[in-house]
């Protein structure tokens, strides 16, 4: 699939898109960083090509360069983008606009940021027709919209069209973006991490919908992803990017079974589920995985968390939503307990109750020997010093205005611990603990990769020397290689510091790596509870079985 940039024009009718010697740079102040360096590849007509690589490899930059949606700091510095043998880079931005949407569709990563919250779904889909100068009449547009939404799994499109984005679930919003991308019947659709913000079951349904409309219209698809399982199951071909360069390309079955480049081999080695060109089930991967070793807990209490009959409801439109419904569970000190479920299952609300950020409506919450419900403001503050949280997105949880040193020192300042000099020493110790150089203290979050940012978030969580750490989807926003590194770091820290982990996740594959016990949550209730081995290898509930089938 790679090509010689010197012979980039082609009459090969099987090639829809040819990228030849493409280079892209980003300028920040006086510094310029190369994101794509002489990238050349072919996209075959009618096939699905996955572009994979870790954060910073250039895969999203590649997608945005083709559709001319690079941020203001990004510049194409060389090369050609040949679409049916026409060099798109020879067109001005104004000349390119009629192609975007009409002949090249784009599915962005974040449906919340990509849909206009002030416009109805109907208005936003119709806008795609007006922006591309569609010649379809009003009745034809209406018919196509309804047809496409039905193809994407919406049984009653008419009831959907008057709604606003906030009234839809994440999976529904993503399918609306797919409907917009396919609405003009483009020859090529580029999907940039279309399921990364979704739960595994929802993501599977979104991909199924995408394949259904792609097959119906014979569309060529470029799928940008960091998920090797997703690439293996959904793509015909694969392109591997490292540091802005193509290091390997070919049919996905061949590349994954017999990788030629060391980087491709390292990517595949980081995935517990992709081996020798095939995807293992979560249960198969679990059987092959080493079990976590015993931990000597920090806390003297045998039980770090005990929830008994805990319930929590939130009001909505005059009614209420039962977020947590009669939940009972225990977490042993020094262990890792994983609470698994899809968005809206109640797992995050449960973790917020444990942290004292929400009050339970009913039941008893005991954390590190304290009855949380009976604590006053001072008692809750004292308890919070003994427990910390690592959030899902390292891109959103770190203040971009602060240096890394200031971010890590925040908890120390909040509790007025130490002098300025001792805090600097503590920050250096914490950065070293998470395997980052002390010199990084002066950097800003935007200068780091996603995995490095999450290490900073972990260092901040350790600043107060806690006994309990709540991990809220700590690796779901990270690439496979970085996920493996962060999970290994978390296990090392747990052994060294005697920590108790309460892990919130939607991915049972992550659970198989680190957890000793698992609770599966759905509609506010724990529907399955047991050892990780029992839950993964001998699931009892239909919902657990569905999670394991992805």
Image: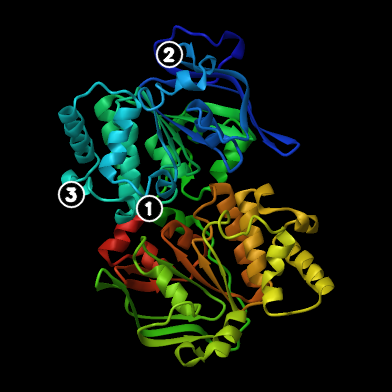
Q: Nearer the viewer, mark 1 or mark 3?
A: 3
Q: Is there CB contact under 8 Å for labels 3 and 2?
A: no
- Dot 1 corresponds to which residue? 200
Q: Is there CB contact under 8 Å for labels 1 and 3?
A: no
Residue 285 x %, y %: 45, 54
As rendered, which of 488 and 26 lies closer to the eye?
26
Q: Nearer the viewer, mark 2 or mark 1?
A: 2
Q: Is residue 77 above or below residue 491?
A: above
**Element under label 1?**
helix
| Outermost bottom residue | 374
Q: CA distance from mark 3 to mark 2?
A: 39 Å
Q: Residues within 10 Å of mark 2 (few under 14, many from 20)?
A: some
Q: Is residue 400 above or below residue 55?
A: below
Q: Is residue 281 above or below residue 207?
A: below
Quarter of the rendering containing residue 282: bottom left
- Dot 2 corresponds to which residue? 84
Residue 265 x %, y %: 58, 38
As rendered, which of 470 and 178 lies closer to the eye?
178
- Dot 3 corresponds to which residue? 159
| Outermost top residue | 11
Q: CA distance from mark 2 to mark 1?
A: 35 Å
Q: CA distance from mark 1 to mark 3?
A: 26 Å
């Amino acid at each position: 699939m790679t090509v010689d940039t010197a012979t980039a024009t082609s009459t090969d009718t099987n090639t829809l898109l040819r990228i030849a010697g493409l280079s892209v740079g980003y300028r920040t102040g006086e510094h310029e960083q190369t994101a794509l360096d002489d990238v050349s590849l072919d996209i075959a007509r009618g096939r699905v090509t996955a572009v994979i690589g870790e954060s910073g490899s250039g895969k999203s930059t590649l997608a945005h360069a083709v559709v001319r949606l690079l941020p203001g700091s990004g510049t194409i510095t060389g090369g050609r983008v040949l679409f049916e043998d026409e060099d798109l880079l020879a067109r001005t931005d104004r000349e390119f606009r009629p192609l975007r949407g009409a002949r090249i569709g784009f599915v962005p990563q974040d449906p919340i940021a990509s849909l206009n919250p002030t416009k109805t779904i109907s208005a936003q889909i119709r806008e795609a027709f007006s922006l591309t100068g569609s010649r379809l009449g009003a009745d034809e547009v209406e018919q196509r919209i309804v047809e496409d939404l039905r193809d994407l799994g919406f049984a009653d499109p008419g009831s959907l069209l008057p709604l606003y984005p906030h009234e839809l679930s994440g999976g529904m919003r993503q399918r609306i973006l797919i409907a917009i991308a396919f609405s003009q019947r483009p020859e090529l659709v580029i999907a940039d991490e279309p399921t990364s913000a979704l739960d595994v079951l929802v993501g599977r349904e979104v991909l199924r919908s995408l394949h259904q409309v792609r097959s119906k219209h014979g569309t060529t698809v470029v799928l940008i992803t960091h998920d090797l399982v997703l690439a293996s199951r959904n793509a015909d071909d694969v392109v591997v990017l490292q540091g802005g360069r193509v290091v390997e390309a070919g049919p996905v079955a061949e590349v994954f079974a017999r990788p030629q480049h060391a980087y491709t081999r390292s990517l595949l080695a980081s995935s517990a589920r992709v081996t020798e060109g095939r995807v293992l089930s979560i249960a198969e991967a679990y059987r092959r995985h080493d079990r976590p070793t015993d931990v000597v807990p920090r806390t003297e209490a045998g039980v770090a968390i005990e929830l008994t009959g805990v319930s929590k409801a939130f009001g909505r439109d005059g009614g209420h939503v039962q977020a947590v419904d009669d939940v009972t569970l225990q977490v042993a000190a020094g262990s890792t307990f994983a609470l698994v479920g899809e968005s809206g299952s109640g797992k995050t609300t449960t973790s917020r109750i444990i942290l004292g950020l929400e009050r339970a409506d009913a039941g008893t919450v005991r954390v590190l020997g304290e009855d949380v419900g009976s604590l006053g403001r001072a008692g809750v503050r004292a308890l919070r010093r003994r427990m910390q949280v690592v959030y899902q997105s390292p891109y959103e949880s770190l203040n971009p205005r602060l240096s890394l040193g200031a971010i890590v020192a925040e908890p120390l300042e909040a509790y007025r611990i130490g002098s300025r000099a001792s805090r600097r020493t503590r920050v250096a110790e914490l950065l070293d603990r998470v395997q980052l150089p002390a010199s990084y203290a002066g950097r800003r979050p935007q200068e780091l990769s996603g995995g490095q940012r999450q290490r900073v978030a972990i260092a901040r969580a350790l600043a107060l020397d806690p006994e309990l750490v709540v991990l809220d989807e700590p690796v779901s926003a990270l690439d496979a290689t970085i996920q493996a590194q962060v999970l290994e770091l978390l296990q090392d820290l747990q052994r060294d510091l005697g920590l108790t982990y309460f892990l919130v996740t939607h991915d049972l594959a992550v659970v198989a790596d680190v957890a000793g016990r698992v609770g599966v949550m759905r509609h506010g209730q724990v529907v399955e509870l047991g050892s990780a081995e029992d839950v993964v290898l001998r699931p009892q509930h239909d919902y657990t079985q569905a999670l394991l089938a992805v």
